[in-house]
Structures are given as C-alpha cells and as structure tokens.
Image: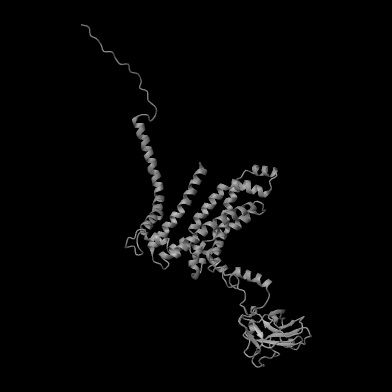
C-alpha cells in the first residue's frame, strides 16, 4: 500500500497592501477625522457660546416676549404686532425709518463715489482721505452732542445759525428794535399791522421828531450818536426832515416829546412817507437818527415807521424744529459715514483696469462719458455692497436720533430703534410691544444681510 501525500499549498512571502487599506487603516482614518472634529469644536465652542448668549437667546426671548402683554403675565398672541401697525407714533417711526433707508444710503453712496473719483486727482489724496475718515473715530454719542450744539437755534451758541445770521445781516442791514414803542399822547399811533404813524400830517419843507422808548441804552447800536444836532436842521420845499430818537435822558430829567441834548438817535430805522394810502418816499435814519424824505410834491404826507423796525431780529433757521429735525440728523450721519463710503469705493476704483479707461479716452470719450459708461458700471458690485451695508446700518440708527432731537420733537424724529427703546424703557414700560418692534426691525434687516452674504460668497467663488 503506497502512501499518498497531500499536495502542499505553495506559500510565498506575504505582501502588504496599500497603507490604510485594511480594517485597521480605516479605523485610524476615522479616528483622525473624529479628532479633527473635536479639535475644531473646542476652538469654535467659545464663539458658539457667545453667539448663542448674545444673539440667538435674545432673538428667541424677544420673539416669545412679543406674544405677551406689557407685564409679561398674559398671552396676547399677535395683538402687539397689530398695535405696531396701528399706533400713530409707531407708524411715524416706520415713516421716518423709510426716509432714512431711502435717503441716507443713496446720498452716502453717491457722495462717496464722487469724492473717490475726485480724490484721485488731488495731490494730497492721502491727507484728504484721512481728514474725511476721521469722523469714523468719533462715537455716535459724541457726534450727537457736537451736532446738538451746532444746530442750537441761538446764534450765540449754534455755529450754523451764527453763519446763517451773519450772511443774512450782511445783505439786510436795517436795524431792529423789537422792544421799542411810542409814548401815549406823543403823536405816534400804532396801527394793526404793527407800524407807527404820525397823527399829524406833514407838508414838504416841514420837520418832525419821532420819539420812542423801551430801548435799553446798552441795546443801542455801537455807532449811535446824539440826536440833538439833527433836530435843528431846516428842510427845503421838496423834502421832509426829521429825527427818530430815544426819548429817554440818562440819569433822569429831560422833557418828554422833545429832543434833549443827551438823548441818542436811533440809527437804521426805516421811515416812509405815505400819501393817499401809498408809500411815495422812503429813508433810513443815520447814526444820529436823522432822515430826509426827498423829492416830494406839494401836499400833505403821513410819516410812518413800518412794522419791520419792531420785528424781532433774525435768529436763523430752526434746525431742530418738527420740519427739519430728520434732515438735520441725517446730515450728522452723512458727516460720520462719508469717509467710510469714500474709502471703500476708492479701493474698488484703484483696482479698475486703467487700460480700459485710457482706451475710452483715446476713442474720444470725455471725462463725464468715461465716468458714466465705464467707471460706474465697473464699480457696480462695490457700490451695491456699500449701499446694502449702509441700509443695514441706518435701520439700527439710535444714538444720533436720541441725542440730537430735543424732547418736544422726539416723536417727530423717532425711528424704529428709538421707538422700541421708548415704549420699552423710556416711559412706556410695555416690553411686549417693544419686543414686537424689535422682531419687526430684525425681519427688515435680515433680507439685506442675506443679500450681502450671498454677494460676498459669489465674489469669493
């Protein structure tokens, strides 16, 4: 019996497969990925906690709080949102916010574009940009205080009204004596329009003296001179001479209705000669109060001091009145953010292909055509980003409105952010309605934010 041997399996040296191709390699790869996720989570966790505490939680809490009443104890559903669109003060805030969104970003973008283009042609461009960008370093609170003082209606305090009054007085040099009045029984009668008219008519060749009281000696113009010499003049046959004077003798004494030696003339007073109800001659008193109505025809005339002599002096523009308070605050906002718009647009302008601009000029295009048909279209992405960013910013504006607008016109200038604070903490004590306003404000801002983020991602791809 022969023994058979089983065939032996040929064995050779075992060759290793690709690194990580086996079970152990796959586990190592998964462990590495998990470790990377843990490390990423550790680094991101502080930011996530801050984001949740400062953004997510307040948003969720405000949404929930907006569904309850002022005290937070009774569920009211959508009543607060219905009140948002029915309360007159809130509707005014929505109207003002709309004005802000339409006007401020448009003006800033246009102004930034114009300045960015012009700065390229200025020799000291860097210094000019720095000067315009400096207001960005000023807080809104400080800027509000600065412009509150600048818009002060009193010309002695407000720099804008001081300039306006200075220009006005340069072209209108007639004096004004708002406290002046005539003594009773001294020949001057006050008519309904505020003018003073002589009771007795005057003929050409005659003279008259018009005495007023109620003007303090320290309120007299600096160039006023004694009226006594002017009262002794003699008139010709075609004129009426006279003097307007302060019928008051310093230290007492003197005679009422008569020009005494120590009494002062009133310069700059307008005087009119009236005949048959029409003004036929005009004059303005000199430093000694003298005047002359000349080239008069024979007849009788009434001499009058028109009401403009007694009108209050021009005090300038009521910048913070109900009509101008919102444009005035927008002006302060423009002062702060113009540098921001100019720098961003200037950065985009510096990256434009110069050969395209030069080619257009060589083809005969003037600077306006180059700007309108080449520069602006190429800058459209930058202009859009600047505009949308400013829209988001003006939706949140609070400091300037709250600081600049005086209390009596606060409601005329209020925007959604200030209205939200006022109804929640500024006396309204209705945090349910305030939370609803906050949610509405968030919903209005989100579309602009989403648009900005999408545009940024497209520009990065």
Identify the residue shown where x is 59% and y is 49%. Answer: 347
Q: Is 356 on the left or on the right of 413, as rendered?
A: right
- Determine the residue located farthest toward the top in the rendered image: 1
Quadrant in which the N terminus appears: top left
Query: Is residue 282 something one can see in this rendering?
Result: no
- Determine the residue located farthest toward the left in the rendered image: 1
Quarter occupied by residue 228: bottom right
Residue 296 vertical position relative to residue 143 in the rendered view, above or below:
below
The color scheme shown is: one colour
Q: Is 433 on the left or on the right of 280, as rendered?
A: left
x and y, in percent, of residue 109 in the image: 57, 54
- Determine the residue located farthest toward the front in the rendered image: 276
Query: Is residue 390 something one can see in this rendering?
Result: yes
x and y, in percent, of residue 101 in the image: 51, 57
Residue 28 vertical position relative to residue 288 in the rendered view, above or below:
above
Residue 62 vertical position relative to residue 320 in the rendered view, above or below:
above
Q: Is 187 on the left or on the right of 442, as rendered?
A: right
| Circle count | 0
Along the line of sight, the residue nearer the viewer: 36 or 274: 274
Quarter occupied by residue 294: bottom right
Identify the residue shown where x is 66% and y is 50%. Answer: 368
x and y, in percent, of residue 88 in the image: 45, 65
x and y, in percent, of residue 383 in the image: 56, 50
Residue 32 vertical position relative to residue 151 in the rendered view, above or below:
above
Along the line of sight, the residue nearer the viewer: 139 or 177: 177
Q: Is 246 on the left or on the right of 41, as rendered?
A: right
């Amino acid at each position: 019996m022969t023994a058979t041997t089983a065939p032996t399996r040929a064995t050779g040296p075992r060759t290793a497969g690709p690194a990580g191709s086996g079970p152990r390699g796959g586990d190592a790869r998964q462990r590495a990925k998990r470790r990377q996720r843990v490390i990423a989570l550790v680094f991101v966790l502080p930011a996530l906690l801050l984001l949740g505490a400062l953004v997510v939680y307040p948003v969720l809490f405000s949404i929930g709080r907006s569904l309850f009443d002022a005290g937070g104890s009774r569920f009211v559903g959508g009543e607060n949102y219905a009140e948002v669109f029915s309360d007159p003060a809130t509707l005014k805030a929505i109207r003002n916010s709309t004005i802000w969104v339409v006007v401020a970003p448009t003006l800033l973008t246009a102004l930034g574009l114009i300045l960015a283009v012009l700065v390229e042609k200025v020799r000291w461009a860097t210094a000019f940009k720095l000067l315009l960008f400096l207001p960005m370093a000023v807080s809104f609170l400080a800027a509000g205080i600065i412009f509150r003082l600048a818009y002060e209606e009193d010309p002695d305090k407000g720099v804008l009204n001081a300039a306006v009054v200075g220009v006005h007085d340069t072209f209108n040099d007639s004096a004004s004596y708002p406290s002046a009045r005539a003594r009773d029984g001294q020949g001057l009668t006050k008519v309904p329009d505020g003018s003073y008219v002589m009771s007795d008519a005057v003929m050409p060749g005659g003279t008259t003296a018009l005495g007023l009281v109620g003007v303090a000696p320290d309120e007299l113009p600096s160039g006023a001179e004694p009226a006594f010499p002017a009262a002794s003049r003699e008139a010709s046959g075609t004129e009426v001479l006279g003097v307007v004077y302060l019928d008051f003798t310093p230290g007492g004494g003197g005679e009422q209705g008569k020009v005494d030696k120590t009494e002062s003339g009133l310069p700059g007073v307008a005087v009119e000669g009236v005949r048959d109800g029409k003004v036929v001659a005009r004059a303005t008193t000199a430093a000694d109060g003298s005047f002359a109505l000349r080239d008069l025809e024979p007849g009788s005339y009434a001499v009058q001091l028109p009401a403009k002599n007694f009108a209050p002096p021009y005090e300038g523009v009521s910048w913070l009145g109900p009509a101008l308070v919102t444009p005035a605050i927008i002006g302060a906002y423009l002062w702060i953010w113009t540098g921001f718009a100019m720098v961003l647009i200037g950065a985009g302008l510096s990256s434009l292909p110069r050969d395209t601009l030069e080619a257009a000029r060589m083809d005969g295009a003037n600077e306006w055509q180059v700007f309108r048909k080449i520069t602006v279209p190429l800058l459209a992405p930058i202009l859009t980003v600047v505009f949308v960013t400013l829209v988001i910013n003006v939706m949140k504006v609070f400091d300037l409105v709250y600081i600049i607008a005086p209390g009596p016109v606060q409601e005329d200038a209020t925007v959604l952010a200030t209205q939200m604070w006022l109804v929640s903490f500024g006396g309204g004590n209705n945090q349910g309605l305030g939370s609803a306003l906050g949610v509405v404000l968030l919903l209005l801002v989100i579309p602009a934010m989403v648009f900005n983020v999408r545009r940024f991602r497209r520009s990065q791809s």
